[in-house]
Amino acid sequence: MSFNIAIDGPAGAGKSTVAKKVAGKLSFVYVDTGAMYRALAVLFLQEGIKANENDKMIKACENAEVTISYRDGVQHVFLNGADITDQLRTEEVGNMASAGSALPEIRAKLLALQKNLAKSYDVVMDGRDIGTNILPGADVKIFLTASAETRANRRFLELRDKGMERDYASILKDIQNRDERDMSRKTAPLKQAEDAERIDSSDMTADEVVDRILEIVVRKRRQA
């Protein structure tokens, strides 16, 4: 029987970094659900669809095929057979993915794939509604958060290190807007599951967060 770890939280809280490290420590499969929504966002942008054109987004995803595979333990995302992993992490794609993920038709498109992965493998899955909607029966649920200012600064430094200059104030505004969108959407809004353990990473390193989650996993396994 598979063991599932669900990590939820707002954009920029460090979910992907932490989830990858936890999966590596436990030899679990890492599933980045946000990357699946970003794959559809790439499609929408390719077709010139705007973030408020819901009907066009729904129509575009009807025949779209999003799949994932693992190479040396690293998740690769495919859109209609093409590996688009290296196209997923731009701000433009992230904002489009946030808009698209609010639509129930788009969420339904990816839900079956996510659930089947969790049934087949020991997984660490991160996103916005893993513990509340996708894997409500997960063995361990984490709600990982940080202040908006901390998350904006992390993104600012990440972009700077990549040689991409971006104004801190605009990054902060984007994060605040995305938080509002994610928490207020009607379908599977961002919220902490009642049985999730909350970790505020504002003053923690990624490795400290990983150690805390591993402690929780050990405790849960002892209680099982």
Image (cartoon, helix red, strand yellow):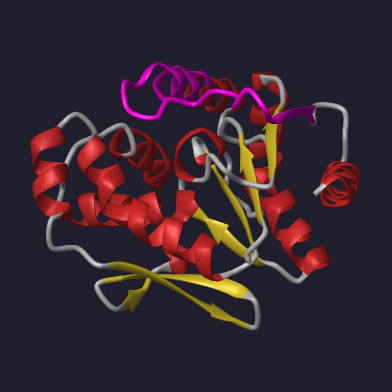
Q: Quadrant of residue 26?
A: bottom right
What is the count of numbered marks? Answer: 0
| Front one among 202 and 66 | 66
Q: Quadrant of residue 63?
A: bottom left
| Front one among 80 and 196 | 196
Q: Quadrant of the N terminus?
A: bottom right
- Most extreme residue toward the front, as rendered? 224
Q: Quadrant of residue 22?
A: bottom right
**Is 136 included in the stretch rendered in magenta?**
no
Q: Is residue 210 above or below residue 50?
A: below
Side of 112 where 204 appears, left or right: right
**Is 180 included in the stretch rendered in magenta?**
yes
Residue at left 32%, top 28%?
187
Residue at left 34%, top 57%?
112
Q: Is residue 126 above or below residue 12?
A: below
The percent coordinates of residue 123 (x first, y second) are: 62, 61
Q: Is residue 159 above or below residue 69?
A: above
Residue at left 13%, top 53%?
60
The percent coordinates of residue 117 (x first, y second) are: 49, 65
- Most extreme residue toward the bottom, as rendered? 72
The percent coordinates of residue 54 (x first, y second) are: 15, 34
The percent coordinates of residue 5 (x first, y second) are: 67, 50
Side of 151 where 207 appears, left or right: right
Q: Which residues are magenta?
A: 176-200
| Front one among 211 and 141 | 141
Side of 121 where 58 appears, left or right: left
Residue at left 39%, top 69%?
84
| Front one among 128 and 120 | 120
